Image (cartoon, helix red, strand yellow):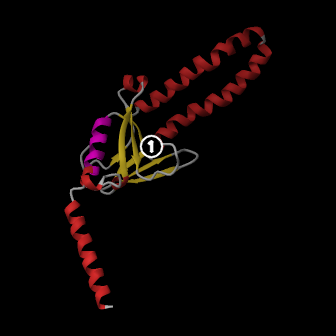
Amino acid sequence: MNDAERILRPSPELVRLYFLYLVIAILVAILPWYIPLLLLAPEVGSIITIILALIVVPVVCWIPKYYSSLVYIFRDEEIECRQGVWFRMLSIVPYNRITNVDVVQGPLSRWLGIATVKVQTAGYSGQVSRAEAKILGVKNYEEVKEYILSKIRGTPTMAMKVSESPRLEDLLRELVRIREILESTLARG
């Protein structure tokens, strides 16, 4: 991803991935009990069919709408992640707060050639270490990760140790100047 590409949307393969998840859920969680129920108690099975249709049809409609809601905007100082159909979520992650960038790819995602880039920040509230932002279903995930890492390298991070800082001497000189100013102020006062 170069600097001209500021807006990123997920690959259409993400829609296929979500539909595959739905099919697997139906095959594993519903069909093993649903088919015997239809054979043994058809009248109960028809009621269950209506209930399942009321669940599955909205999910089928939701998947493309959710996909359309995903937008990632890479600005000079931050990443903006927008998502949500019914409940909209906006995450803004400054590069100077990013502590970790991971690429997550399950077997189906790998088969489809997509991955999720997870971005973690310093000072995320909560005990569980989880991603502050997730860039879902991108094909060029390594390029996205490298772009974010290059932005991080261009700005000092909150998690960077002082001993690793390229400006350690500058910080020390500044502290000495502050001490001298304080000493001279106290000596006059």
| Residue at disc 1, secondary structure | loop
Pinpoint residue 159: horizontal percent, then vertical percent.
Answer: 35, 52
* Residue placed most toward the observer, 155 or 82: 155
Indicate the amino acid at tag 1: Ala
| Front-lying residue, 178 or 30 | 178
Q: Quadrant of the C terminus?
A: bottom left
**Residue that badge 1 annotates:** 131
> Residue 37 occupies which quadrant of the picture?
top right
Lateral position of residue 182 relative to residue 136, left or right: left
Give the prevailing secondary structure in the magenta stretch: helix
Q: Is residue 187 above or below residue 158?
A: below
Quadrant position of residue 187: bottom left
User: What is the tally of numbered marks visible in this picture?
Assistant: 1
Q: Is residue 36 above or below residue 64?
A: above
Residue range (magenta): 140-152
Pointer 1 local density, CA inside 10 Å: few below 14, some 14–19, many at least 20? some
Q: Is residue 150 left or right of residue 59?
A: left
Does residue 4 appear in the picture of this structure?
Answer: no
Question: Which residue shows up at 32% across the image and 85% down it?
Answer: 186
Q: Position of residue 30 (x, y in %)?
A: 64, 19
